[in-house]
Image: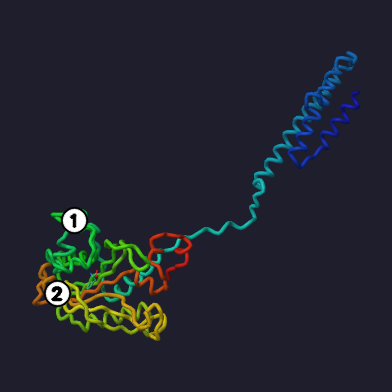
Amino acid sequence: MLNQIKEHISEVEKFQANTAEAVEAFRIQYLGKKGVLNGLFSAFKDVPNDEKKEFGQTLNELKTKAQEKVEALKTALEEKEDQSGSGLDLTMSAEPMRMGSRHPLSIVKNEIVEIFARLGFTISEGPEIEDDWHNFSALNLPDEHPARDMQDTFFIQRDPDYLLRTHTSSVQVRFMEKNQAPIRTLSPGRVFRNEAISARAHCIFHQIEGLYVDENVSFADLKQTLLHFAQEFFGKETQIRLRPSYFPFTEPSAEVDISCNICKGKGCNICKYTGWVEILGCGMVDPNVLENCGIDAKKYTGFAFGMGVERITMLKYQIKDLRLFFENDVRFLDQFTSA
Ligand code: PHE
């Protein structure tokens, strides 16, 4: 019997296992209710008294060794699992991280701002909720002026009027009220008009308006500045043409077209086969506006222009539906990268 136990001891010492199941089977075989050890312990009572001591000691040795073996194998298996992370291969390269990208409107806005910054224009900003003076009256649009209808206004409150600004010309009024000439400022921002939402129009959109006031500023300066902008933004070969137009705050006023950057002037559906596409409105600041804002109109003249960022972005990237800018579909937004 003693020899049998010793054999068990050497078997326990030799035992190795790679799986949790094999360790558990081993534990049950030796330490389980009907296991080897319990069998031997129950045989203990039949052992002759003079052998009991040695038998007991050897049996206890077997029990300790079996318990230690189970613990050691379990620990080894757990360590192995930690390292491999239950199927996790630590040598594998990481999943690529998804990077965000700038919104196309921000990319284009930044590009436009940079072009004018090189000409010395700085940025000015103002509130989206405006009063009547800054959005209309100061800009030569007194009460009941029919041109107020050109801008379908969202009113927040009537009398006194508070409204969502319909253009960022309001920011330029605020700027002139606080600063004297010479002025070179650019006002990018969100504007609001009560228009039906379609592929070509939205009730929220973005504008960049520019204002230049100094002594002897002429229409030629305006034209040359806008030609420079068009060629920097759309490419050196771009041409511009000015068509007479009307804005209450500028006189004379013009609308500016660029030669179609898609068909290069040959005619396509973007330029409606005319070879030209409209990009902005502009003009010489009406002396009334300068005076309204505290600038001496006998000494100073100025030009102003305003463009829609959505429109310029659609032309640049040939986007056909303006609504895409506001839906924030990542599949659309992912396609644009800034330089
Ligand atoms: N404020 C005009 C608009 O929103 C654009 C403009 C700005 C026109 C400056 C002329 C001069 O339509």
* Residue found 20% across the figure and 64% down from its top: 170
Q: Badge 1 local density, few (<14 within 10 Å), some, or many (20+)? A: some
Mark 2 vs mark 1: give the one in front.
1
Instruction: Give ligand 1's quarter of the image.
Output: bottom left
> Which x, y percent locates residue 290?
13, 71
> Which x, y percent locates residue 128?
25, 59
Q: Which residue is mark 1?
A: 162
Whether residue 109 is visible here, answered yes or no, is no
Residue at the limit of the structure toward the top, as seen here: 49
Local SS, label 2 = loop
Front residue of this view, candidates 61 and 111: 111
Front residue of this view, candidates 195 and 294: 195
Name the quadrant containing residue 57: top right
Left or right of 242: which side holds 109?
right
Front residue of this view, candidates 293 and 32: 293
Whether residue 22 is visible here, answered yes or no, is yes
> Which x, y percent locates residue 18?
76, 42
> Which x, y percent locates residue 216?
15, 81
* Residue found 90% across the figure and 14% down from its top: 48
Left or right of 162: which side holds 329?
right
Q: Badge 2 local density, few (<14 within 10 Å), some, or many (20+)? A: many
